[in-house]
Image (tube, helix red, strand yellow):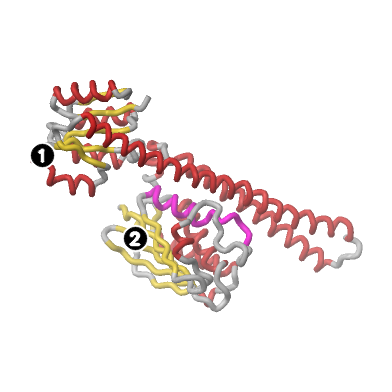
Amino acid sequence: MKKILVIDDAEFILESTSALLEFEGYDVITAENGKIGVEMAKEFKPDLILCDISMPVMDGFEVLDNIRSDNITHRTPFIFLTAFNEKSNMRDGMTKGADDYLVKPYSRDEIVSAINAQWKKYNVFEKHVKSKVEQVGKSVTYALPHEFRTAINEIKGNAGIIYQESESLDTNEIKMLSHDIVQSVSRLSKITESYLLYIRLNNIEDNEELIEEIKLQRTEEPFAVAYDIVNNIAAKYDRFEDFIVKNETMGICINMSSENFYVIMNELSDNAFKFSKKGDKVTMSSKIINDKLFIELSDEGIGIDENQISNIAALNQFNREKNEQQGIGLGLIIAKKMIELHNGDFNIIGNGIGNGTKITLSFPITQ
């Protein structure tokens, strides 16, 4: 049975609306003001909220702000109940995230129709989410075995050569084969760590207490930290001369742990060098706008198109057939999830295939 929360300071509205909805088969809970309504929404997690605008203690707009800013209730369908003379305020209400509104006095058909429209919209959204989950599931089913097999086969093959032909191999040949084994083990370790991190990020999305604890962590002088990270990646690819730095920020601190910041910058800069060739420039710049640190990382590599940008999803490696690379492609989604977890922003700008990629990150600045 679907649960509906009705918030209104008029007792007769609460009683009549509750009776109507209960007759329609809904489980109804009521609140006589906005403050109580917000508390009940968090406690009972209704499937839909009907809320008056003009109320004492907390008005409908404040209720909506609280509902939309809470990790538990932020996706709950929300319908305003408004008097005719308040109808002009509905543009603001819809802009702030309301799903619909009903003008009092409303008929049975009007309220039932409005609620059914929300169920229909929710079902479409649910199907979309289910489709995405299935898509990720299929990608996991394909990508993990493929990447594990690739690394394991390389280890097995090189180790087999050493074992079977050790007497005929010289020192340099053994070193080369051993080096390939170490590289495969490192790649296998990174694949495993990335996948476990992705799962961990998904698991904490609804843990409000843990999220608040994470947001208390800090990184000082983030651009200097980022420079060291990207510089090490440039060294890994033997491309010091391709790395260009433009820094306008010093003496600041951001709301993010140094461990998470490292993961983000390491993943993104590794992609920038991996998917560009020697001689292609990788540029990192920074600036401060409205108490946020913006870091831009751009490259002149293979690039991505608009469809690929709009379909950023876990385990999606762009143009894999043409650009076969190791790793299951979790870098972008991990970076995006981490930044958004800390109230930052993650944006990708692609100029089309072959024209490079630009990624802009923003982080809230703290004391």
Horizontally, residue 317 falls left or right of residue 148, namely: left
Is residue 220 depicted above or below 40 in this figure? below
Is residue 12 depicted above or below 103 in this figure? above
Residue 337 in magenta?
yes
Q: Position of residue 274 (x, y in %)?
A: 57, 67
For the stretch drawn in magenta, what is the main secondary structure?
helix
Which range of residues does the magenta coloring cover? Answer: 325-342
- N-term-proximal mark, 1 vs 2: 1
Look at 48% across and 71% down and name the residue there. 356
Q: Amino acid under label 1?
A: Phe
Q: Position of residue 151 (x, y in %)?
A: 70, 55
Q: Which SS class for mark 1?
A: helix
Question: For this rendering, which residue is in front, 84 or 38?
Answer: 84
Q: Which residue is mark 1?
A: 84
Q: Amino acid under label 2?
A: Leu
Q: Which residue is mark 2?
A: 293
